[in-house]
Amino acid sequence: MKIDILTIFPEMFKPFISESIVGRAVKENLVEINIHNIRDYSKDPHKKVDDYGYGGGKGMVLMPQPIFDAVDDLKTDDSIVILMTPQGEKYSQKKAYDLKDKKHLILICGHYEGFDERIRTLADAELSIGDYVLTGGELASMVITDSIVRLIPGVIKEESHLNESFNDGLLDYPVYTKPVSFRGMDVPEVLLSGHHANIDKYRYEESLKRTKARRPDLLEGENYE
């Protein structure tokens, strides 16, 4: 997979693409991630990429020319262009699975007061990571990139993400490690029993209990017993 990210703050991405699981995936050539400075495509002598919006109002708006030229330069027949915007579809684990099978993603990071409306015509999808507003789309693009890269075969063990929250519509069950007893809190005996059927039953019941308590919306229309 290849991921191209368009931003006016490319320095933000250096540690992201060089550290941890994402960094290892890049080093092992399991994914190619390229960061592009939108200003490099500006035809303005001062590399300007934003201006005041017509009709008045506070804040600056990203201009279409640099972003259109950047997408024209990077896009191929296999490309999916995604706009990072709080107005977009709310991102989900299901969407991460859908995107991990794409050959090429182009993520466009918004900033300031948003995009010139005509930039939306470039996008195959508009995504939001939640009902709140960030100073720009950089952090959102990192979240989406991270969630996709970890699903690419070979990046982490498949069993590590098959039982995670949201994969079966439920939140993940509680997990424990050493010591068995810590400050009066003990690991549930069933997890120490070695009885795999009982452990599976316990984990399912705990997942269901946790989902009912924390995210009952995930259970709407579903039949869990």
Image: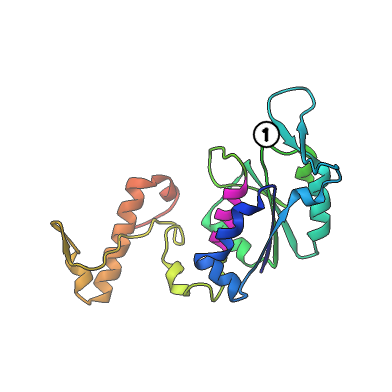
Report the side of 223 relative to 117 (left or right): left
Q: Main secondary structure of the magenta part?
A: helix
Report the side of 92 relative to 53 (left or right): left
- Residue drawn at the location 53% of the way across and 43% of the way down: 130
Amino acid of disc 1 = Glu
- Residue drawn at the location 27% of the way across and 75% of the way down: 196
Residue 163 position within the rendered picture, expressed as x and y whole percent measured from the top left = 41, 66
Q: How many marks?
A: 1
Q: Tag 1, which secondary structure?
A: loop
In the image, residue 139 sits, relative to residue 113, either above or below, namely below
Any magenta on residue 144? yes
Q: Quadrant of residue 112?
A: top right
Residue 207 position within the rendered picture, expressed as x and y whole percent measured from the top left = 33, 58
Residue 76 position within the rendered picture, expressed as x and y whole percent measured from the top left = 80, 63
Viewer-proximal residue, 114 or 166? 114
Most extreme residue toward the left is 184
Report which residue position mark 1 lands on. 113
Residue 80 position within the rendered picture, expressed as x and y whole percent measured from the top left = 72, 58
Q: Quadrant of residue 73?
A: bottom right
In the image, residue 54 sits, relative to residue 47, either above or below, namely above
Is residue 122 among the parts visible in the rendering?
A: no
Report the side of 16 relative to 82 (left or right): left
Most extreme residue toward the top is 56
Give, as a single range, the part of the protein colored magenta.
Answer: 137-148
Viewer-proximal residue, 93 or 43? 43
Any magenta on residue 81? no
Instruction: Name the quadrant of the N terminus.
Output: bottom right
Most extreme residue toward the front is 46
Is residue 133 among the parts visible in the rendering?
A: yes
Instruction: Name the quadrant of the C terminus.
Output: bottom left
